[in-house]
Image (cartoon, coloured by chain):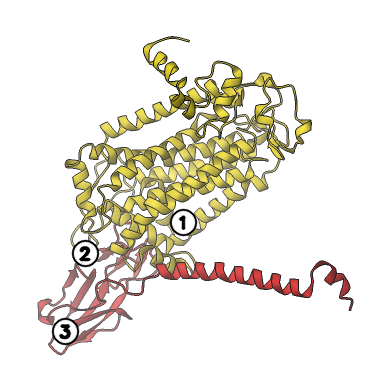
Chain colours: A red, B yellow
Amino acid sequence: MDHSTISKDVSRRGFFQLTLGWLAAAFAVCASTVGAVRFLVPNVLFEPSLLFKAGKPEDYPDGSVTFLEDERVFLVRQGNTFRCLSAICTHLGCTVNRTGQGYDCPCHGSIFDDQGTVKSGPAPRSLTWFSVALSKDHRLLVDKSKQVNPDKYLVL
Amino acid sequence: MNSSLPNRIWKWFEHTRVGRSIFRVGLPQSNLERAQAMVSSFLLHIQPAKVNRHSLRASYSLGLGLISLYLFLILIVTGVLLMFYYVPSTDHAYNNMKDLQFVVSAGLLMRNMHRWAAHLMVIFVLLHMCRVFYTGGYKRPREFNWVLGIGLFLLTLGLSFTGYLLPWDQLAFWAITVGTNIAAYLPYIGPRLKYLMLGGNVVGQEALIRFYALHVIVLPAVAGFLIAVHLWRVRKDGGLSRPDEPGDVIQQVEVSQLPTSKTYGLMELARGTTPQVGKNPEDEVFAWPHLVFRELLLFLFVVVVVLLLAIFRNAPLEELANPIHPPNPAKAPWYFLGLQELVSYSAFWGGVVVPGVLVIALVLLPYLDRKRRGVGRWFARERVVANTIFTVCLVIAVVLTIIGTLFRGPNWSWQEPWKKPPAATEGH
């Protein structure tokens, strides 16, 4: 090993100083970038709670599909079973409209059947079903953070 | 020189001590002073003292870049005025719009001018890009300025899009909901990007303040800086593209080797890498008055057109934003409707892949198409292949935009604009 050719250009001390300097500069740039991006990511959201009470089960007549405007969901009652379907189109987030046989999205024309399955249009996934439970004070309790399969019911 | 009263007052003023301290050179009387007037003025010095006759031809450049710049200036002025009344809050924004419309003196006019100038800027930046393409202006040595131009085009769209949310009406709310959901289709970073843009999961107060900050400071500052670099590069790359320019405009020129054929060698006193503005002094005329007065005239023309539009056409304002009821059909801003039409077939392919590939292709274009033939002429025969490809892409984009704008009715179904739309399906 011949160190002399290397040391002619950069001394050992110079090499470490250079490396340290560039590393420090790179670290400073990266850290401040990451810090700035992290600053922009909110820690607390002032959005409505995903868990909400949807009133008494008796409020919904048998066989009805009720649109709850504020929560953008449909509450579906069949006999003594209750389900909750998201009204937010899985394509680009518009609110779907209830039609006779299913649901239509007004933005890009996706059509869903009454199970929320895509029949036509650009929507990549079926509409989401949310978990429905009964609270202690006998109210329907919908949790929009919990997705369930369409064959899951709350039976009363 | 005519000797009207304003002219005599000016003559008197420019010879006073104060006048001399402001304007080193008065109204130029000789060719030397014409050159000095350009070089000694902060506002004019970005332009050369002499310009090529070819660059002055309106039939060549059509003034499209300048028009875009003027629209940007109009947008800055009207935008700053609007800021004095606008509060970026979901409780106030919409009412501010109504105030501007009905209460504030000339508020409606300012808002209309801002809106129409924004739409026109999108159109003219695009037309400017087409002009540069069809005349081969992106070729060496102007490759990088083309790339800067693409950046400015995207910034123009970004400025327009962020401004779209601010009125907080139905149009704004749903256009941004659709637009940000398209971004969410980007692989891996998509959902995070949407969360970062909106400052949450839905379009609300956090999103409004973010779009506001982007719209009034971040994007204009970046665009302003890039415009400055873009203009500076036009100068450094040898002015507008011309058919007769030498292959390499940029040459290393020693001061001692500078050509002495010019009547005034003022602008050659630059050291190092410098453009040879023109080979032949006969091809050049003094920027004052030939260029400066054309520019002023064009500026007046642009202001008049925007004013007329603003007087006779009102900017749209729909109902207050309502997250529950999307309008049917919900449409993005018109310049994104080609994209929305594509998105109606597939969000990933139409919203991410196609526009992504197009932008990358546009950026790489000057580095891929390297032949230096047919530069400086419209639709040069040597460039028939490139021109055909570009025209096909352009026509597809325009047709898709027209379909999305005019031929899409409720539920995004096909709807001839001359027929009455069927009653929109409402009720849930």
The residue shown at (58%, 71%) is: A27
The residue shown at (54%, 30%) is: B61
Tags 1 and 3 both on a single chain: no
Residue under numbered circle 1: B350
Amino acid tagged 2: Gly
**What is the total number of numbered labels drawn onto the structure image?**
3
The quadrant holding residue A26 is bottom right
Seen from the viewer's position, the closer of residues B257 and A129 is B257
Where disc 2 sits, the SS reads: loop
The dot on residue B171 is none
Where disc 3 sits, the SS reads: loop
Residue under numbered circle 2: A100
The dot on residue A80 is 3
Where disc 1 sits, the SS reads: helix
Q: Nearer the viewer, mark 2 or mark 1?
A: 1
Amino acid tagged 1: Gly
Amino acid tagged 3: Asn
The residue shown at (46%, 21%) is: B14
In the displayed structure, does residue B261 sit left or right of residue A52?
Answer: right
Decide which of tag 3 and tag 2 comes sooner along the chain: 3
